[in-house]
Image: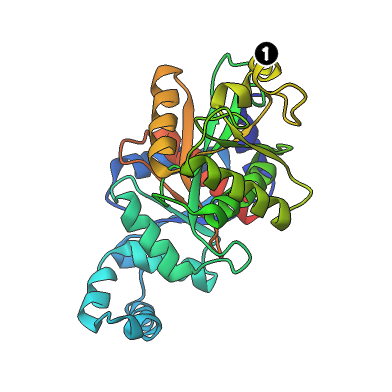
Amino acid sequence: MNTITQIREKAKGKRKHIVLPEYDEPRTIEAVKIIEAEGLAQVTVLSPDKVNPLDNQRYIEQFYEDFKAKDMDLDAVKKYFSDTLYTAAMMTREGKFDGFVAGASHTTPDVARAAIRCLGIDERITIASSCFIMAVPHCIYGDHGTFVFADCGIIPEPNPRQLACIAVAASELGNKVLGLEPRIAFLSYSTKGSAKGKNVEKVLEALSVVREMAPNLLVDGEMQVDAAIVPEVAEIKYPNGPIGGRANVLIFPNLEAGNISYKLVERLAKARALGPLLMGLTKPCSDLSRGCSIEDIVDCVAVTAIRAQ
């Protein structure tokens, strides 16, 4: 069973209610037909006529109370809630939906801001970040071509503690959604001291932090990507390392590296890239690339539903 089929089958196990606020996006409408036909989730396409005006006014007032201390005025809040994106996020927070998926017609910063502001941050993880599930065809690396890449969408220059939190969140997502036994590699331009620099030091500090946070995780670094995923290279560059070139969760040192890498793998290896899947929030939420396909929307809804199970 390939990764995408596995995800869809798992989503059917306990159907969750996912809201899609991009009601005027044709790809969303087509995706809903597939989701409903396959029984992956219960879905609501949230058009303005489905929003109770009294509820929306209550959300506006609640949001304003939450953020007025941060110099957000009421007119700005009303403008946010003229878009169903923020209403969907507040309805998810309230428990009317189990998760939400958007991004086909909104930018990642727009979706991330709505999710962070409305859903709030998980106190255990402490930061919002993102990951991609990468399914690479005809690939012997990772878990038969399946990887989790993080962070590829949110934090430009994570500090060591943030990198550690990203690693913990990504490993938990990979385990829940895919059943992966996480083997986590902190990536760098250096493998175990082959080069020096501040970025190498940052990765080493992150490794120390994550081992304190989650001592049972199999995690190592710093590693160049070939040493992380190719056993033959690992044997040369880092013999007897605990991961042995079998990493399936790749933690990038910054957003630039992560974003470039996932897009290269997606285009050059014809991989499926599901995400950005937002992590570290109180409820599951998935962003979409504005260049996403109908199938991408279907599969991100399936992943969001599994995370809500």
* In the displayed structure image, the side of residue 50 where residue 126 appears, left or right: right
Q: Nearer the viewer, residue 129 or 41?
A: 129
Q: Quadrant of the C terminus?
A: bottom right
Q: Nearer the viewer, residue 193 or 38?
A: 193
* Extreme-front residue of the structure: 196
Question: Secondary structure beneath disc 1?
Answer: helix
Residue 91 on image: x %, y %: 46, 69
Residue 254, by quadrant, is top left
Residue 289 shows in the view: yes
Q: Quadrant of the N terminus?
A: top right
Model colouring: rainbow
Q: Residue at x 44, y 31 (%)?
A: 262
Amino acid at circle 1: Glu
Q: Residue at x 55, y 59 (%)?
A: 280
Is residue 198 shown above or below 214? Answer: above
Total number of numbered discs in the rendering: 1
| Residue, disc 1 | 232
Q: Residue at x 65, y 30 (%)?
A: 247
Residue 199 on image: x %, y %: 48, 42
Q: Nearer the viewer, residue 150 or 285?
A: 150
Residue 32 on image: x %, y %: 43, 44
* In the displayed structure image, the side of residue 278 where residue 80 appears, left or right: left
Number of residues whose C-alpha sits closer than 10 Å to that of mark 1, classed few (under 14), some (14–19) or many (20 or more): some
Q: Residue at x 63, y 18 (%)?
A: 230
Residue 21 shows in the view: no
Is residue 120 shown above or below 154? Answer: below
* In the displayed structure image, the side of residue 86 where residue 211 appears, left or right: right
Residue 68, by quadrant, is bottom left
Residue 296 on image: x %, y %: 44, 36
